[in-house]
Amino acid sequence: MKTLPFHQDEKKQHVSVDCADGQLSVYRYCAFCVHCTGVRVGNRVIPSPQKQAMTDIRIGGSGDEVLLQAAMMFNTFVRDGSAIECDDDANQGFASLYYH
């Protein structure tokens, strides 16, 4: 497990991390990556809401609504956070959560 610190602009509208694929947007890539395990907010690591959403969908939840709520929660965590927790110890780079 590794911690990837955020690189942010002044307004926190563009947040990126140094991934095996280069510097990638947290909102575009980490949010939908199978390796993202959570967001570091202060001293805590908050688990990735997208992974929980995928579990909820598999057991019969409403897909669109669950995924939208998870995306909004993730964006809130990133706004308040400082880093992404990533389990890509093999440096494979981005791998889609939805096509695995």
Image (tube, grey):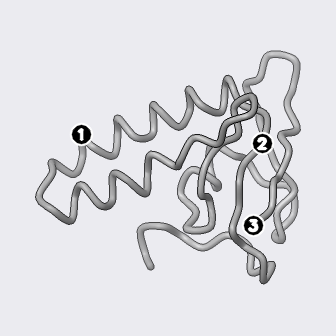
Determine crowd level at label 2: few under 14, some 14-19, many 20+ residues with C-alpha closer than 10 A: many
Determine crowd level at label 3: few under 14, some 14-19, many 20+ residues with C-alpha closer than 10 A: few
Give the image location of residue 47, x and y in percent.
53, 47
Residue behind mark 3: 1
> Is 52 placed left or right of 23 in the picture?
left
9 in relation to 5, above or below: above
Give the image location of residue 45, x and y in percent.
64, 42
Give the Cα distance between marks 3 and 1: 30 Å
Splitting the image into 4 quarters, where does residue 30 fall?
A: bottom right
Residue behind mark 1: 65
> Is 9 placed left or right of 100 in the picture?
right
**Furthest residue in direction left, as rendered:** 60
Residue behind mark 2: 83
The kind of residue on which mark 2 rests is Ala
Splitting the image into 4 quarters, where does residue 88 fall?
A: bottom right
Question: The N terminus lies in which quarter of the figure?
Answer: bottom right
Give the image location of residue 66, x and y in percent.
27, 43
